[in-house]
């Protein structure tokens, strides 16, 4: 690509950044979805009556990419406004307890920590793909 002005270079860079950020948003949401799903790989002992609602598995989300000036951003997060029908905990407390493996919430803890680590790698890989060369 040949650019003829700083303004043209800035437009080209922002277009590439927009593509990279949209890709990162999708891939990082998938990273989180995969890690949260792993929570259910433990704690489902058939000998104990423990009803799996899979509500936690529905909470990963990502905001649309927002661009303003030369800045672009999005967030990947866990919704906290879902109801948790098998107990009295709020979703925020369910997420906190499930992440820490406490309060009788049965499953594989550490899903958010694992998500954050995986998302950092994904983000860096995507930015490298789009901006190295």
Image: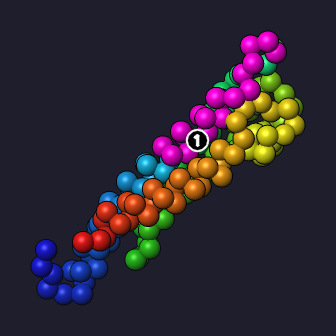
Q: Main secondary structure of the magenta part?
A: helix
User: How crowded is the residue under tag 1: few (<14 C-alpha within 10 Å), some, or many (20+)?
Assistant: many
Give the residue at x 31% y 63%.
Answer: 129
Task: Give percent across and percent down for residue 121.
Answer: 48, 58
Question: Magenta stretch?
Answer: 30-48
Task: Give percent across and percent down for residue 100.
Answer: 78, 45
Q: Is residue 40 visible?
A: yes
Task: Give percent across and percent down for residue 2.
Answer: 12, 79
For residue 94, side relative to residue 116 (left or right): right
Between residue 33 and residue 90, name the one nearer to us: 33
Quadrant, the C terminus = bottom left
For residue 76, side relative to residue 84 (left or right): left
Residue closest to the far bottom = 5
Quadrant, the N terminus = bottom left
Indicate yes or no whether the magenta region holds residue 45. yes
> Regarding mark 1 in the picture, which secondary structure is present there?
helix
Residue 70 figure quarter: bottom left
Residue that badge 1 annotates: 35
For residue 120, side relative to residue 51 (left or right): left
Give the residue at x 66% y 52%.
Answer: 113
Chosen colour scheme: rainbow
């Amino acid at each position: 690509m040949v650019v003829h002005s700083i303004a043209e270079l800035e437009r080209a860079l922002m277009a590439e950044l927009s593509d990279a950020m949209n890709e990162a948003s999708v891939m990082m949401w998938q990273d989180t979805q995969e890690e949260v799903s792993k929570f259910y790989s433990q704690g489902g002992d058939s000998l104990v009556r423990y009803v799996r609602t899979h509500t936690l598995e529905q909470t990963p989300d990502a905001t649309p990419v927002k661009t303003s000036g030369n800045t672009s951003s999005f967030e990947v997060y866990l919704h906290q406004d879902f109801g948790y029908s098998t107990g009295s905990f709020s979703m925020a407390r369910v997420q906190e307890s499930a992440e820490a493996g406490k309060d009788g919430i049965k499953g594989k803890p550490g899903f958010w920590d694992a998500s954050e680590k995986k998302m950092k790698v994904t983000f860096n890989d995507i930015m490298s793909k789009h901006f190295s060369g």
